[in-house]
Image (tube, rainbow, N blue to C red):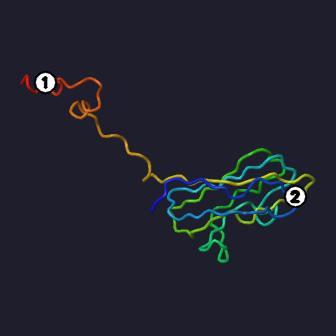
């Protein structure tokens, strides 16, 4: 079964200072096609946010089981840099191409905040966007023959009384 669109939450909103964020969720990609976007929302920061520590850019990991005992980093899914201490009130996204071979479960890899004075208010969510196969096709070329079926103006031949013919 193919599912064209799905929204999900991965990291509930929370304020973290000096440590890993709690409740790092995952998405089950079974049936999804197209692209998966994982978005990170950063509030008023005074420290950096990364994967595993505050100096490694955020990235995604994937696994065959929801327990992530066989987790591996998704190649090419890392951000260009960590979310910095001055990158307040911004949204960051990682795109994951579901058309390529992948494992079933995906999540952000160990989002972690550095040691600051107030912390890092952050959350993550995302959604899958359908591939081109799910985009509705353009309607057929309309001709006068098939347009009359949808026109509010009656077709003169069909509107005549059959008994009058």
Q: On residue 59, which mark appears?
A: none
Residue furthest right as drawn: 117
Q: Is residue 7 left or right of residue 49?
A: left
**Helix, strand or loop status at disc 2:** loop
| Figure check: 109 above or below 132 | below
Residue furthest bottom as drawn: 69
Residue furthest left as drawn: 165
Residue position marked by numbered label 1 in the rendering: 161
Crowding near pointer 2: few (<14 within 10 Å), some, many (20+)? many
Q: Position of residue 52 (x, y in %)?
A: 78, 67
Q: Quadrant of residue 14?
A: bottom right
- Considering the image in quadrants, where does the N terminus appear? bottom left
- Considering the image in quadrants, where does the C terminus appear? top left
Which mark sits nearer the N-terminus, 2 or 1? 2
| Figure check: 101 above or below 97 | below
- Viewer-closest of 142 and 7: 7
- Viewer-closest of 9 and 50: 9
Q: CA distance from mark 2 to mark 1?
A: 81 Å
* Residue at the spot 77% in from the left edge and 49% down from the top edge: 42
* Residue at the spot 63% in from the left edge and 69% down from the top edge: 62
Q: Determine contact: label 2, label 1, CB under 8 Å.
A: no
Crowding near pointer 1: few (<14 within 10 Å), some, many (20+)? few
* Residue at the spot 21% in from the left edge and 33% down from the top edge: 145
- Viewer-closest of 140 and 84: 140
| Foreground tag (2 vs 1) | 1
Q: Position of residue 164 (x, y in %)?
A: 8, 22
Residue position marked by numbered label 2 in the rendering: 17
């Amino acid at each position: 079964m193919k599912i064209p669109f799905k929204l999900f939450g991965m990291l509930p909103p929370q304020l973290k200072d000096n440590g890993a964020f709690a409740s790092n969720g995952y998405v089950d990609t079974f049936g999804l096609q197209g692209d998966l976007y994982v978005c990170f929302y950063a509030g008023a920061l005074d420290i950096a946010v990364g994967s595993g520590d505050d100096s490694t850019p955020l990235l995604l990991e994937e696994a065959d089981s929801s327990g992530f005992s066989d987790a591996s980093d998704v190649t090419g899914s890392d951000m260009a840099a960590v979310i910095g201490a001055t990158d307040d009130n911004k949204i960051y996204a990682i795109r994951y191409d579901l058309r390529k071979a992948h494992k079933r479960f995906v999540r952000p890899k160990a989002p972690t905040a550095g040691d600051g004075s107030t912390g890092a208010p952050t959350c993550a969510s995302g959604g899958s966007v359908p591939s081109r196969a799910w985009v509705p096709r353009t309607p057929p070329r309309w001709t006068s023959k098939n347009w009359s079926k949808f026109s509010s103006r009656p077709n003169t031949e069909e509107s005549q009384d059959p008994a009058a013919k």
